[in-house]
Image (tube, grey):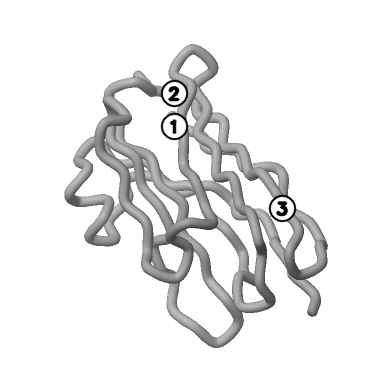
Amino acid sequence: QVQLVESGGGLVQAGDSLRLSCKASGRTFSSNAMGWFRQAPGKERELVAAIGWSAIYTYYTDSVKGRFTISRDDAKNTVYLQMNSLKPEDTAVYYCAQNNNYLGLIRGRSDYWGQGTQVTVSS
């Protein structure tokens, strides 16, 4: 059974940084694409960033380009989301996702989801 466990969320001020982590277990991590989605109150869940199994391919939604960086450590079965220059509009629950198909992931489909971690950015 696949488990995705997020950590690293919290309450910060605008301009601060946070690093989210997602540790995966249950199937071969290195052969799967990983991603971070977020859902703000009253809004649909959106893909924030994704990384392919080889880390050659990465995707970022326009609103976070230049501020967020996704990375993976296959030895630790962990994917990270470094978030810099945070803005109040980044406030959301952030979810880790895993898909064995990178294109499927960036189209919003995930085989598995984490439980979510809250990120709140105050102005």
Mark 2 vs 3: CB contact within 8 A: no
Q: Quadrant of the N terminus?
A: top left
For disc 3, the marked residue is 17
For disc 2, the marked residue is 26
As measured in the structure, the alpha-carbon distance from the residue carrying label 1 to the one carrying label 2 is 4 Å
- Left-right relation of 64 to 21: left
Considering depth in this image, is 3 or 6 the residue closer to the camera? 6
Outermost residue to the front: 66
Considering depth in this image, is 48 or 86 the residue closer to the camera? 86
- The first of marks 1 and 2 along the sequence is 1
- Give the residue type that dot 1 points to: Val
In x, y percent, where is residue 43? 49, 83
Quadrant of residue 112 in the image?
A: top left
Outermost residue to the bottom: 42
- The first of marks 2 and 3 along the sequence is 3
- The first of marks 1 and 3 along the sequence is 1
- Give the residue type that dot 3 points to: Ser
**Rendered position, 85 above or below 32:** below
